[in-house]
Image (cartoon, rainbow, N blue to C red):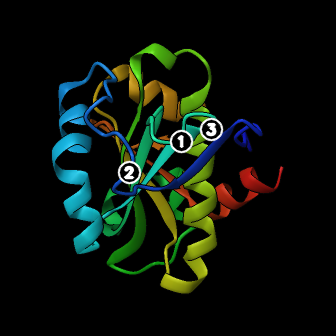
Amino acid sequence: MAKKPTADLRIELLAEWHDRRGFSCGVESLDRYLKTQAGQDVRRRANAVFVLAAVAEPERVLGYYTLCAMTISQGEVPEAARKLIPRYPLVSATLIGRLAVAKDHQGQRLGAILLADALQRAFASASTVGSSMVVVDALDEAAAGFYAAHGFIRLPNSRRLVLPMVRAGGMIKN
């Protein structure tokens, strides 16, 4: 899983100089978020927004993801993941709220690069802020399949998937 950006790519926090208006992934809600809401969320510290760009064209957003803290009810955690997390009524987690790749760069494994970076950042901050799992809410079945293929466990009757932080750490180190 530990797919890192190549030397010609970089992932960094969203900045004013990134061209958000030119981004299009083909999913209207993800496009609209980056164009109209992401900057405000960063300023208000509601979400951390990370963008993938080519070193040669740093202002062009090739993809992005968001991270924020959340809690999930112990009862929502799948049995397969429950033994790897604390037994509190509410379990602290890190939410990958959005993950998108520009339409003209899809199919180039950039989603896997973004996911690996998100997991690495989530794992690195988990000991500081307390997070025992990573949570995603897949927009559709294709997205749910993407996360499941990367080790996430699906909650019954939903498109929410979780990955215990212990497993995320193991994936990063491999």
Q: Which residue is mark 1?
A: 58
The CA span between labels 3 and 1 is 17 Å
Q: Which residue is mark 3?
A: 113
Element under disc 3: helix
Q: Position of residue 84 (x, y in %)?
A: 59, 66
Please tell me whether residue 148 is drawn above or below residue 89 in the rendered image: above
Q: Amino acid at mark 2?
A: Trp
Q: Nearer the viewer, residue 72 or 64?
A: 64
The CA span between labels 2 and 1 is 9 Å
Quarter of the picture containing the N terminus is top right
Q: Which residue is mark 2?
A: 17
Q: Quadrant of residue 20?
A: top left
Q: Is residue 4 visible?
A: yes
Q: Residue at x 61, y 18 (%)?
A: 108
Between discs 2 and 1, the one toward the N terminus = 2
Q: Quadrant of residue 161?
A: top left
Between discs 3 and 1, the one toward the N terminus = 1
Is label 3 in contact with label 2 (beta carbons under 8 Å)?
no
Image-based side of 46 in relation to 81, left or right: left
